[in-house]
Amino acid sequence: MIDKNSPLPIYYQIQEMIRKKIDTAEWEPGDMLPSERIFAEDFDVSRMTVRQAVTELANEGLLHREKGKGTFVAEPKIEQPLQGLTSFTEDMKARGLTPGSVLIQYTLRTAPLKVSEKLQANTDVPVYEIKRIRLADDVPMAYERTFINSAIVGELPEDIENRSIYYFLEKEKGFKIGDGEQTFEASLANTEEAGRLDINEGDPILLIQRITYLEDGTPLEYVKSAYRGDRYKFTIKMPR
Amino acid sequence: MIDKNSPLPIYYQIQEMIRKKIDTAEWEPGDMLPSERIFAEDFDVSRMTVRQAVTELANEGLLHREKGKGTFVAEPKIEQPLQGLTSFTEDMKARGLTPGSVLIQYTLRTAPLKVSEKLQANTDVPVYEIKRIRLADDVPMAYERTFINSAIVGELPEDIENRSIYYFLEKEKGFKIGDGEQTFEASLANTEEAGRLDINEGDPILLIQRITYLEDGTPLEYVKSAYRGDRYKFTIKMPR
DNA sequence: AAAATATAGTTGTCTATACCATTAATCTTC
DNA sequence: GAAGATTAATGGTATAGACAACTATATTTT
C-alpha cells in the first residue's frame, strides 16, 4: 500500500490513499480516521510523516482535526458548484448526471499553428489530438477536441477515454496540475458540430476553450468544447 | 525577538515576524530570505520549526520556495485579466476599451418571482431594476438587467449609471462584497435583445447571470446580461 | 576556451523522540 | 449517585539529526 522505494514521497502516497478512501466512500463524512500514531505504526513510518500528509488534507478542508479527539472526514462543503477546475466527468457527476464518452478520433500528430501557440510550443511539437462526444445520461452534451502536448506527458494509454485524464496524469504520472484559463463564447453550430451533437446547424452552442497549466506554468493541454446551448449552463463561484 | 517562554508557539512568532518584515517593505518581492538553517541558528530553534512557519506563509502565497535556490518574497499577486469578480467597467478597461452605458430604465419596484428567489427574499421585497446598454468604444456590447435588493442597500443615487455600482457600494456605503456566482449560457437573440444590441434576431448571444453576495452571504444583486456573441469572449483564470 | 567535475549551499523528505494541552472514559471518594 | 481525581488517548509543538534532490559556483581536466 505504501511503497518506501517509490519515487513518490511517502507523505504523498499516504495523502492519496486517504483521499481515495474518502472518494470511494469507504470513509464517510464524520468518520474518525485512525490516529496519527496508529497510522505511523501501520505504515512503519514516522508520525511526523503522517502529519505532513494529514496537514495538507486538513488545509484543503477534506479532513478536520480536533485536539484531544481525533481527525475526522470533513462534511462535504455545501454550495460547491464548480469552484475550480473540473473535468467534464466531475462536472456531470456534480449535476447528478451520468457522464459518458464516445471516442471519435485519437491520433498523435504535429500541432496545428493555433494549437502550438496556445501550448507555447513549436509548430512541430507532437500532440495528441482527441475528439470525443461527451454524453450526459447517454445524450450528447458536448463535442470536445483535446490537444495534449506529448512532449510533456509522454505516452498515453489507449484506453484513456474511459478514464479521467487528470486523474491519470496526477495520480499515475505524478504531474501537478496548476491553474487553468477558460474562455466562454456564444456561437452557432456549424455542420460538423451540429452533426456530432445531434442538433441543427445554426443552433446556439457555448464554446469553451481551456488551457490547463502545470504548477510551473507550462501549458499542458488545450481543449475546445462545443456545448449544446439548450442543455448546458456553466456555473461558477468567483471570489471577491 | 523570539520568546521561547511565550504562550504563543515559536513557529507562529517566526511567521508573524516574517509577515511584518514584508509588510513594512523591509523585505521586498524577489528578496531572498535567510536560509532555513540560518534562521534556525539565529533563533536557536530547530529547522523543522522554521519550516513550519515558512510552509504556512508559502501556502498563503506570501513566500515562494525554490528547491536548491532558496525562499523568496513572492511577487504581489497581479490582478490577472478577470481572476475574480469584476464589473463591466473594469472588464472593458482591462481589455483596453472605453466602457460606456446607456440607461434604458431605472425603477424601484417589487421583485418578480424569479428575481426574489435568486435574492433569497420575499416576493414583495423592493428592488431597483436597472436596464442598461453597455458600450465598448461606443458600440453596444451587452444588454444588462440589474436587480438590486433595496432593502439591503437603501437609497441609490440617480446618476448611478455613470459610475461603478460596486465602487459606490464599497467605498461610499461601506458594504463588503463577497463571492459571486456566475452562470454562462449560449442562446439566440430575441427581438428585444436584437434591437438593443443592434444585431439580428437569432444571432448568438452569451447570457451571463450573476448573483453577487455580501461577505456574510446575503445576496445583494442579480444581473442578467446578454453579450453579443460576435464581440465578446469571457476569459477567466481558475485555480485547481 | 570548453567541458567535465567537484563542492557548497539550498529546500525536500524522513526519522525517532519528547513533552504539552485537550478530551473522554474510568476510577475513587464523599 | 454525584463530584472529583486519575488515566489513556488524541492532536500540537518542538528537537536534532540525516540523507536526497537540486542549483550555482568554483575548480579541474581536456
Image: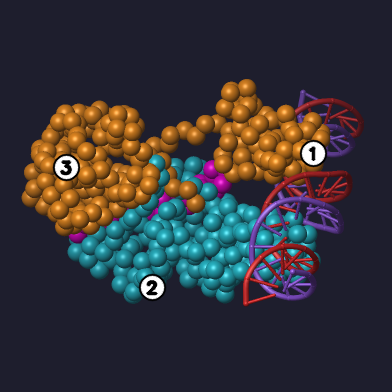
Chain colours: A cyan, B orange, C purple, D red
Chain letter behind tag 1: B
Q: Name the residue under label 1.
A: B45
What is the CA distance from the residue labelled 3 to the residue labelled 2?
Answer: 41 Å
Q: Which amino acid, by three-letter code, is at mark 3? A: Tyr
User: Which is in the foreground here, disc 3 or disc 2?
Assistant: 3
Q: Which amino acid, by three-letter code, is at mark 2? A: Thr
Picture coordinates of residue C10, whole percent (x, y): 75, 36
User: Which is in the foreground here, disc 2 or disc 1?
Assistant: 1
Mark on residue B128?
A: 3
Q: Mark 2 points at which residue?
A: A98
Q: Of helix, strand and loop, which one carries label 3?
A: strand
Count residues near mark 3 (Cα–Cα under 10 Å), then give few for <14, some for 14-19, many for 20+.
many
Q: Which amino acid, by three-letter code, is at mark 1? A: Val
Magenta residue span? A203-224
Q: Magenta region's main secondary structure? A: strand
Query: Which residue is drawn at the image coordinates 28% and 66% (left, top)?
Result: A197
To the question of a shared chain for discs 3 and 2, the answer is no
Q: Is residue D15 left or right of residue B80?
A: right
